[in-house]
Image (tube, rainbow, N blue to C red):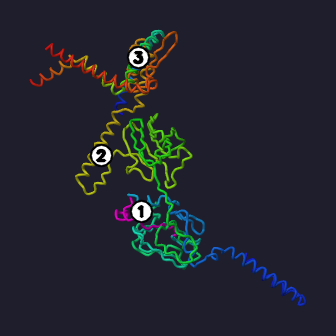
Amino acid sequence: MITQAVLYALNAVVTTLLGFLPSLPSFPDTVTSALSTINSIIIAPIHLISYLYTPLIAAFVFGLILVILNFDNIYKLVMFVMHKVRG
Amino acid sequence: MRISNFRNLINRKYDLRSKSSSSVSLVGRKSCLLLALLFGLSSIVSLVSYSTDVSAASAYDNAYLSTDNVKVGLSVGDSGSPSLYCNDTDISKSWVSFITDESNPWFDADKKAEFNSALDNGSWGVSNHYTTTSYTEEGRYGRKVAYVYFNGTQQMPMTWSNRYITISNATVLVIDCNATTHELTAYYDGSNLTRAFSYNPVYETDPWSKTYNFFMNTTAQNIPEGYEGTVPPTTPDIKTRVHPDLEYQVKNRDLKVQYLKNIPNASRINWQIFNADDEGISTGDPIYEKFGNQISNNPNLDYKFEKQGKYVLVAGVESYPPFLPIPPELDVQPRVVQLNIDGTSYEGNTEGEECDDGYCQVVSPLEDCGTYGTDLIGGIGCQFRNFLVSLGIAMRFLFIPNPDFIEDYWTDITEFMSNKLGFLYGGIAFIVTLLTNAITATANPDCVLTFAGKLWGQDFAVNGCAMQQTFPAFFPMMQTLVIGGTVVVLIFAAQRKYHEVLEQR
């Protein structure tokens, strides 16, 4: 109830503020079509990976890849926290 | 018929007196013949009317009266007006489940054990008769009650007389209508009493005084010699009432129902979902219908409600294939479950206490603290848990918006931004669409990934996501290899990365 009220208020503010501005033209169809194609190209492998790995394993593998790629930063963060804890 | 004949005779006698004396002898002979003819006809009519009595081979033949069903509650008074009691309820098939219901306090563990013993290998019987409620100027009012007799052993002898039958050593239960609550009730009516269960000899012609026996299963029937009347059945044709037992989970607007047990193998479940009114009673035609086939190992139901509200789920059962009937000893009835789709998550089981005779009410998230009785600590703990649950419900109501609202809100605001910001919003829309599609793709593994081209001059198109259908034997093997290879590569990459980091230190 409270969240709904906040969202309603936010919507009212945004629409009121933007209401004063003129409407801008949208992308030409060719650009929209190109973006849609790029979208499809990116999504297709995700479909295939989800299909091969099953959604749960795909999410796990994706998370693990993120961890490995950012291992340096994670290691630094862990060491930083441990040093702080030790004083 | 006989009264009109008698009047004719009197009229003729009166007419004879007015005739002249010369014609008396002739008329008298004709009258005698006519009289004899009329008496003969009357006798034949009487014999036909009371053939049942006359055909009795022994004096006991009419003592046992049987009926095909047992009804309790409303009976019609002499004037034809109904008495103000319960609706007439046929308990022919439900009397066992009714009296053994856990909510009946009088049917304690000992009585239940004795009753089960009686059904298994003892003696038991059910009879149906009237009980007079009141006399008025218009006649007599009353209601029907049922008596249940049982004995855990086979020592429940029947004693026959030409007017009535008695049974001995029976525990007697009465299924009656409660005049105050207008609901069926059952109570214990003494033990080891001798019961007369045929008609009362004082009111031999009074149908109200007769007892109609439904079943009487005892080996000690003691049927008198020469008896040719109805023989009490010794193999009762009792059906076991069953409802499909289900387990269900409601998560937001998603419903998952798993069939557990209780329907015959050769049958299928007819799932139906109805809208319900505020009382939880189904209204109108079903909004969804599906057959859950047990043979194809797909008896369950998954359904997503379009909007929040109150609904009723009905799991009907029908024979399948149709030429294989449901076993006659089973009385398979539908299972009805009330559902409250309000954005909360809960789960239920039709074997729970919320279900009564196949009808299950909405599962309450709160515990029944009354069951703790005098256990003060347990009661306080129960109240505390209920408080936390209620607090959670209140918080959810206050802070977690309705999913329908979120969906509509998101659609409205993206449409507004797209119209207003035009190409500036194009980039944001691209990212949003990409994320939405990625989440959908992850949640739904069904995909279409077509590889098309020319091979040896021939056009070809292969769907990369149809490998399971294309290579059903190899796909699981390939999937295992791919997942295993990925795990090995990831472990190798993690190990190498770990060493790299350590070497830098």
Over which residues does the magenta segment extend? B103-130
Q: Earlier in the sequence, mark 1 or mark 2?
A: 1
Residue ID at (51%, 40%): B291
* Residue B94 vs residue B145, the one in the foreground: B94
**Between marks 1 and 2, how big is the CA–CA gap?**
43 Å
In this rendering, would B343 be left or right of B50? left
Q: Are marks 3 and 1 on the same chain?
A: yes
Under mark 1, the amino acid is: Asp
Q: Secondary structure at mark 3?
A: helix
Label 3 resides on the chain identified as B
Amino acid at pointer 3: Ala
Kindly state the secondary structure of the residue where label 1 is placed.
helix
Within the image, what quadrant is residue B81 found in? bottom right
Q: Amino acid at mark 2?
A: Asn
Chain letter of the residue beneath label 1 in the structure image? B
Residue B463 on image: x %, y %: 46, 19
The residue wearing badge 3 is B429
Callout 1 environment at 10 Å: few (<14), some (14 to 19), or many (20+)?
few
Residue A64 on image: x %, y %: 27, 22
